[in-house]
Image (spheres, helix red, strand yellow):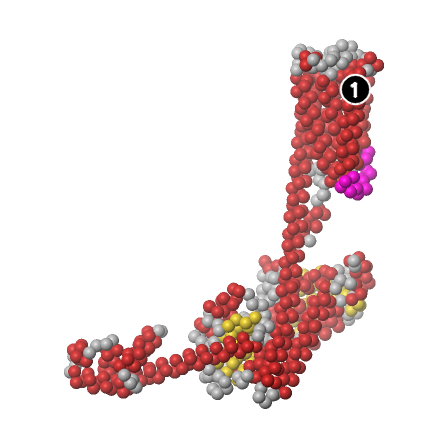
Amino acid sequence: MKASSDAREEHPFPLTMSAPSRDQQRLAASVLVILVVALLITAPFARIPLKNTEVLVPAYAAAVFVNELITAALLLALYSVQRSRALLALSIGYLFSGMMVLPWALTFPGVFTSLGLPDTGLQSTAAIATLRRLGFPIFVLAYALLQDSGPSVRSSYGSVRSSILGSVAGVVAIGCALTWLIVTSDDVLPRFMKDARNVAPVWQYVPGIAVSLYLVGLVLLWTRSRSVLNLWLMVVLCTLLVEIIMLSYLSGGLRLSVGWWAGRLYGFISASIVLLVLLSEMTTLYARIVRSVSAERRAREARLMAMEALSASIAHEVNQPLASMVTNADAGLRWLGRQSPNVDEASMALQRIVHDGHRAGKVIEGIRTMFKKSAQERVPLNLNLLISDELSRSQSEIQLRRISIQVALHEQLPLVTGSSVQLQQVISNLVLNAIDAMSGVTGRDRVLCIKSALQDSGSILVSVEDSGTGIAPNYKERIFEPFFTTKPDGMGMGLMFCRSIIEAHGGRLWTMDKEPQGAIFQFTLPSAGDAISITAETAP
Amino acid sequence: MSTDQSIVFIIDDDPFVRASIESLLRSVGYTVRPFASTQEFMLNERLDAPSCLVLDVRLPGRSGLEFQRELNESDIRRPIVFITGHGDVPMSVTAMKAGAIEFLTKPFRDQDLLDAVHRGLEMDRGRRAEAAMLAELRKRFHAMTPREREVMALVATGRLNKQIAAQLDLSEITVKVHRSHVMRKMDAKSLPDLVRFADRLAINTKKP
């Protein structure tokens, strides 16, 4: 019970479905503020060139490569669980962006010429950078747009695997092909660069388009559902925006200047923060899975325990008549085996065997009825009749214990739909409990009070009240657990069965204190009109 | 088996189980008194006869095991045969440690119950004979004069007449006379007889 309600409160996929917490929103906002402040601080020095910093380009590229590949892997893992195409698109975007960093760094002028690689021409680096810069936001847009389509059709494990493998292979192939095309056809590429350091006027279109793509992405994400992932993607887009402003406008497109490096550095740092957030979210997800698995295990153990308790009580119930039968048969044989056989005694023993046989049969029948789930067994019942039946049956017990009865039954009580055996069992259990509760009472009246009433909601309320010793507060819930009993000889099963029966009938059973002394057990049941829909729902 | 007025008491709350055990025991000639609860048993039974209790572990009110403890505490030593619907090991160990004859799990073999009851009655008979014997010895002992009791105690420790005379400051003749009175009043045929009686009295009088 508990486990399932937990699951309802928390989303199974916190990253993509639940709203970001206050802390996360604050963290995201502060990352943005720091970015803008850093941008403003760096702006005046943006155009100062940093000579001979080409050696840092491979290091930067490697860091970005690892960073984006891990992000892509995390997102793919999430996709394999959640199967939303939006996530697949986003992870492909990360994969593409991470992969294209490699040719970008390899073709960067002056970086790898020392390694003996052929100089690929001026425009390749810029062309690859353009692809990266424009490619990533397009994938983000795809993510934002696909989000509404929700989880795709539940596909099998195999098809998820093949879709992941296919996408990865496709991205790698396209990346390689594009790189090859760019590297081999340097002359037909647009003239982005004037020389190794300075951009040509054509380049100005690229950041322009990139900025507008980022802005569209931001707007789309803003209007979509607020999830943790969306929040951090917005941070990523803002970071890219700041980066492009630094790279293309503040530094005047001057490669290897302070602004150029600062933009890349800021971008990388905030991308790392995003990665950290993703990792921590994955850990949370994992912890949640562990918790729900252990909750499931606990529930299973509780069920097992209930089963054990049940079989113990069945064994006890059946064993009693069985033992009696065996002993009676033995006694009968001995009466007949005497030198002068005593037929009267033997036939009395046989009669007791007959009675025990019926008794055992009734126990079995009762158990079967109690657990039969079929709705055919449910018939319209008058609870008042069940109550008066029970009272007349325990009449002698009540008189013997000098208990006075007060009965207040609602005269026009609507019928309920249910199993008469099961509900009889509940009423009988509650009445016998009340009688037992008053066995130790001296010096005041022993009063058993039974009421039935019609509630405003249309459901029927039955309460059984005693003037006994009451229930200790810390036992209030435990008395409904299997094996918990306050009676020296109790099995601790009665109230557990009562509660499960009442709940199976769409009602509730609970207990409360009676003033000044005693306990009240109450249960509600839907009246027949309401009950039909409930039984229809619960029927298999 | 019904030669003496031995009685078997059955305490079980289930009337049909009770009736079946009663019938079984009666079929082999026992006198049986069935009860539905220990309270009923305590109220009605003050019989001075060899007896044995067939007790259900699970009873309304006090459980059978608790009842056994109470009986032991109030020094009512009745042999008890336990019967239970679901016997578990710790329960039977507790019962046996507290002096139960047998711990039978329902459904039990009739012969097991009969054997256990038989053993219980034998034990009770033995215990009662022992108790009767001791009471008799005490009566004889208390019928003697204080001087004779002194002489008996010394004779029982193996002293010679001469030593006793010296210790009690009497003549040897007087000791001899006392000694013959002791033998007669205690109904001892020989010196070993007397020593055994003294032993038994000493053991049993030391007990509170």
Dividing the picture into quadrants, the one containing residue A232 is: top right
Of B58 and A432, the residue lying toward us: B58
Of A461 and A307, the residue lying toward us: A307
Asked if residue A153 is among those painted magenta in the image, a careful observer would answer yes
Say few, some or many: other residues with alpha carbon within 10 Å of mark 1 (under 14 / 14 to 19 / 20 or more). few
> Dot 1 falls on which chain?
A
User: Residue sitting at 63 percent across and 62 percent down?
Assistant: A309
Looking at the image, is A290 positioned above or below residue A340?
Answer: above
Viewed as shown, does residue A114 lie left or right of B177?
right
Looking at this view, name the residue that lies furthest to the top.
A195
Residue B46 image point, x, y percent: 48, 82
Residue A50 image point, x, y percent: 67, 12
User: Residue sitting at 76 percent across and 10 percent down?
Assistant: A195
Q: Which residues are magenta?
A: A144-159
User: Residue sitting at 46 percent across and 71 percent down?
Assistant: B99
Q: Is residue B33 visible?
A: yes
Dividing the picture into quadrants, the one containing residue A504 is: bottom right
Q: Callout 1, which amino acid?
A: Trp
Could you tell me which quadrant the C terminus of chain B lies in?
Answer: bottom left
Residue A76 image point, x, y percent: 73, 34
Looking at the image, is B157 positioned above or below residue A42?
Answer: below
What is the secondary structure assignment of the residue under circle 1? helix
Asked if residue A287 is among those painted magenta in the image, a careful observer would answer no
Q: Is residue A37 visible?
A: no
User: Residue sitting at 78 percent across and 17 percent down?
Assistant: A183
Looking at this view, name the residue that lies furthest to the bottom.
A340
| Residue, disc 1 | A180
